[in-house]
Amino acid sequence: MLEVDATGQASVGESQVSPQQGHNKDHVYRDLQDFDQIRLLHLQPRSGSEKIECTIELAKFSKMPEYEALSYMWGPANPLHSILIDGANFEVRENLWLALQHLRLESESRVLWIDAICINQWNIHERNHQVAQMAQIYEEATTVVVWLGAPDSSSAIAFQLLASPWKWTAFIQPSNDLEVLSRGNRQLSALHSLLSREYWKRLWIIQEFLMAQKFVLQCG
């Protein structure tokens, strides 16, 4: 995991609006009372069970609630995995399910804004308004968590390199081709692989994490 704040200091540490399938959406979603309200997801800590458990809170955006915002790819519509929201089954796509598995803390809940859950995707009026508000939602988040997907054999090497910029910034210039530089270099090859993931090709990436006060890169 790599943390970067608004000053550029680093340390290790799209909204796709098609609705996803799920159960008991009427139980999960209470109508927002006005345009100042947003939903926040409280991701419950690990409990020894593989089942992901969450609750939803209605919060006034103008009161500046503290939350982290998740930036990620929705990914394929199938397979779906079931999580619990306020005791009701709710199905999410696999990439989000993996992210929630890894984002759970050991002993305390984590407050998150996640578009696929915090926006009622079946309510077109709400969805359109919330999507228009997303730039502000990401900008006001205490941290934007950039979920790059499940780890692979080289991702740990890439994060170690990113945490030590003096090892690579001296010879990687804007005019250089990282793919060419990485040939025969295990560390640069790992970095090239990480930066070639589909996430970086998303249109929504600009408003989601480039405006963030602080962002965290996470891969597994």
Image: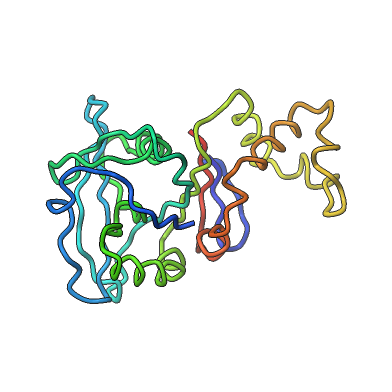
Rendered location of residue 55, percent (x, y): 19, 48
Q: Is residue 113 above or below residue 99?
A: below
The answer to which of 70 and 197 lies nearer the viewer is: 197
Rendered location of residue 213, percent (x, y): 50, 63
The answer to which of 21 and 96 lies nearer the viewer is: 21
Rendered location of residue 13, percent (x, y): 51, 41
Residue at 44% from the left image edge and 46% from the top image edge: 74
Q: How many marks?
A: 0
Q: Report the coloring of the rendering.
A: rainbow
Residue at 20% from the left image edge and 63% from the top image edge: 58
The answer to which of 95 and 152 lies nearer the viewer is: 95
Residue at 40% from the left image edge and 71% from the top image edge: 133
Give the left or right position of residue 42, taking residue 173 as reference.
left
Rendered location of residue 154, percent (x, y): 64, 27
Give the left or right position of residue 169, taking residue 194 as reference.
right
Q: Quadrant of residue 180?
A: top right
Q: Quadrant of residue 38?
A: bottom left
Residue at 63% from the left image edge and 58% from the top image edge: 8
